[in-house]
Amino acid sequence: QLKLQESGPGLVKPSETLSLTCTVSGGSISSFFWTWIRQSPGKGPEWLGYLHYNGDTDYNPSLKSRVSISADTTKNQVSLRLTSLTAADTAVYYCARETISSTYHPHWFDPWGQGTLVIVSS
Amino acid sequence: QSVLTQPPSVSGAPGQRVAISCTGSGSNIGANYDVHWYQQLAGTAPKLLIYGNNNRPSGVPDRFSGSKSGTSASLAITGLQAEDEAEYFCQSYDSSLTAVVFGGGTKLTVL
């Protein structure tokens, strides 16, 4: 059974860079798409971007200049980097596997990790 | 303000049927992009409930069903149970934003 676990600092200062890691167990990160999604308090989820195992990436245009996603296949981990943080970036950050389908578009996300809360504050 | 609009809350008594709407526009649901639904129990991560408008993953009870028409989609839950109390989100794609988009979420209360 595939399991995803996010980890990273719970508190970061404004203007700093956030780095989060998603450790995948029960399967290899090769052969799939991996997505980062965040959810601010009381709001719906926001898609941040995805990484394909072949290295292709796509990011939400609203964040494109600040976000990057990468992978370490030796550790079976997917990482998120978000720069120039502000209070608006305070959220629970989730990683998820993006299920690929030739029938439906867009793809869907399953499973999700448990999420990690990131607070941006001085 | 989410691109996909959901009612903030719905409620129903045990055994009843409720429906949750997800209203989009011509650049997302109306552009024939598919809709997926997630259930988020309190304090947990979202869980896939419906994919491809009306398909249930293995393990999801058939009390849950989805539909899509025009610029809207809907999630129906029949035979409400206390364990269904959760937040529900819809997800699709918007061609104007060139991004995956989610609804703002609907809190279901089982009376």
Image (cartoon, coloured by chain):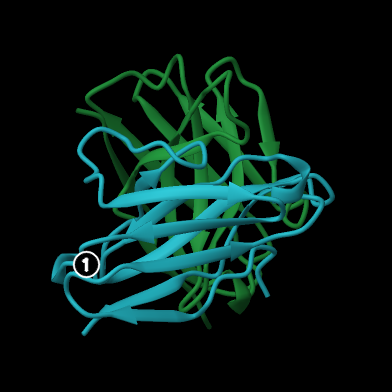
Q: Determine the residue positioned at 31% across, 35% down.
A: B57
Q: Determine the residue positioned at 62% across, 75% down.
A: A88
- From the image, tell me which residue sits under label 1: B80
Give residue B43's position: percent from left, percent from top: 26, 69
Give residue A55's position: percent from left, percent from top: 61, 20
Chain colored green? A
Residue type indicated by callout 1: Leu
Q: Quadrant of residue A24?
A: top left
Element at badge 1?
Answer: loop
The image shows residue B61, relative to residue B82, as above or below, that is above
Query: Residue A10: in sight, yes or no?
Result: no
Q: Determine the residue positioned at 17% across, 74% down.
A: B14
Give residue B27's position: percent from left, percent from top: 81, 50
Q: Quadrant of residue A15?
A: bottom right
Q: Is residue B14 left or right of residue A34?
A: left
Closest to the observer: A79 or B100? Answer: B100
Chain colored cyan? B
Which quadrant does the N terminus of chain B fall into? bottom right
Give residue B10's position: percent from left, percent from top: 40, 79
